[in-house]
């Protein structure tokens, strides 16, 4: 603590920051962001052993995302080019890039919204309370992130790989920037079915958000069967909706048995 500050002043300053919305300590030392405005932008990080493919710079962030995503021949290089993408402001406030969890050879790919606090800390999707509920939902139909029987495994990712501040929903512009990466991600995992958890992935892949109306009904996106379901965070707030989700899980299980 600054020796010039007495306990009560320091406490009042801290409370004032919390009131302004600063609920987390990100660094030990304060940063004057006005001074940073004139500094050169951070260089894109290059991996030493296997450099990310170099895409020609594009003026439009969505176009650049498309070129980068198209240049990725496998999941590792997709992770590398997406993590190096500099146009999404959310990257600046996140601790970690959250790419996936589960089995890349799974038949089911689950797409959520964005990392929350726990996911940002652990760099893994769906590891907080909603993620624990998701694990229980999967277990109810004999599935898991990494099941001994690969057929019963799932692959989990999000539309947005960086945590939005205060866990707000990603904006339409942020989703548009991530969409080429999501599409390539789906191509590379090549699942039999896609499960969309909540409105954000429905907005991204189906262009509509009416989860309460479209949940549980098979539709199609990116040339694959898609099942929209309630987001587990919604189920934590609305436990009554678990009944419909149970029906949706059985719908998913039946489809997997059929094919
Ligand atoms: N909610 C999501 O949509 N994704 C996560 O990874 C965690 C919570």
Image (spheres, rainbow, N blue to C red):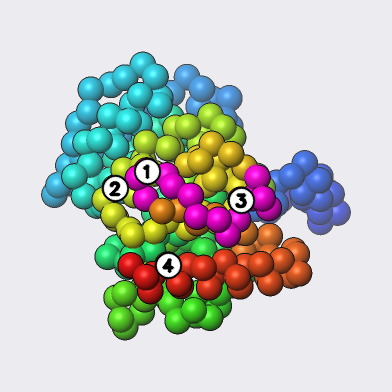
- Provide the residue span drawn in magenta: 210-224
Callout 3 crowding tier (Cα within 10 Å): few <14, some 14–19, many ≥20:
some
SS for callout 3 = helix
Alpha carbons under labels 3 and 2: distance apart: 24 Å
Question: Which residue is drawn at the image coordinates 50% and 74% (left, top)?
Answer: 138
Question: Which residue is drawn at the image coordinates 77% and 41% (left, top)?
Answer: 20
Question: Which residue is drawn at the image coordinates 68% and 70% (left, top)?
Answer: 242
Q: Is residue 214 magenta?
A: yes
Alpha carbons under labels 1 and 3: distance apart: 17 Å
Residue that label 3 marks:
214
Label drawn at residue 255? 4
Callout 2 crowding tier (Cα within 10 Å): few <14, some 14–19, many ≥20:
some
Q: Earlier in the sequence, mark 1 or mark 4?
A: 1
Q: Is mark 3 within 8 Å of ligand 1?
A: no
Q: Is residue 56 magenta?
A: no
Q: Earlier in the sequence, mark 4 or mark 3?
A: 3
Q: Earlier in the sequence, mark 3 or mark 2?
A: 2
Residue that label 2 marks:
187
- Is residue 54 left or right of 120 when viewed as pictured? left
SS for callout 2 = helix
Vertical placement of 58 versus 258: above or below?
Answer: above
Q: Position of residue 99 (x, y in %)?
A: 39, 54
Q: Earlier in the sequence, mark 4 or mark 2?
A: 2
- Residues at discs 1 and 3 in contact (Cβ within 8 Å): no
Residue 93 image-quadrant placement:
top right
Which quarter of the figure is the C terminus placed in?
bottom left
Residue that label 1 marks:
222
């Amino acid at each position: 603590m600054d020796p010039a500050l007495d306990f009560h002043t320091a406490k009042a300053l801290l409370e004032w920051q919390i009131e302004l919305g600063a609920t987390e300590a990100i660094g030990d030392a304060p940063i004057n962001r006005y001074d940073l405005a004139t500094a050169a932008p951070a260089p894109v990080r290059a991996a030493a052993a296997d450099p990310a493919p170099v895409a020609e710079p594009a003026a439009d962030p969505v176009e650049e995302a498309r070129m980068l995503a198209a240049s990725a021949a496998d999941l590792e290089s997709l992770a590398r080019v997406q993590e190096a993408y500099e146009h999404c402001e959310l990257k600046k406030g996140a601790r970690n890039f959250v790419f996936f969890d589960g089995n890349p050879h799974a038949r089911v790919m689950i797409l959520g919204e964005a990392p929350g606090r726990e996911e940002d800390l652990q760099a893994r999707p769906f590891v907080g309370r909603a993620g624990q509920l998701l694990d229980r939902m999967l277990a109810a139909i004999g599935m898991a992130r990494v099941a001994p029987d690969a057929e019963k495994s799932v692959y989990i990712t999000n539309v947005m790989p960086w945590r939005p501040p205060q866990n707000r929903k990603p904006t339409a512009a942020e989703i548009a920037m991530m969409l080429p990466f999501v599409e390539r991600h789906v191509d590379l995992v090549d699942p039999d079915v896609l499960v969309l958890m909540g409105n954000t992935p429905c907005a991204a892949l189906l262009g509509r958000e009416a989860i309460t109306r479209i949940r549980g009904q098979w539709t199609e996106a990116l040339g694959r069967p898609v099942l929209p379901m309630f987001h587990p965070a919604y189920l934590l707030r609305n436990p009554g909706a678990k009944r419909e989700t149970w029906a949706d899980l059985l719908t998913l299980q039946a489809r997997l048995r059929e094919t």
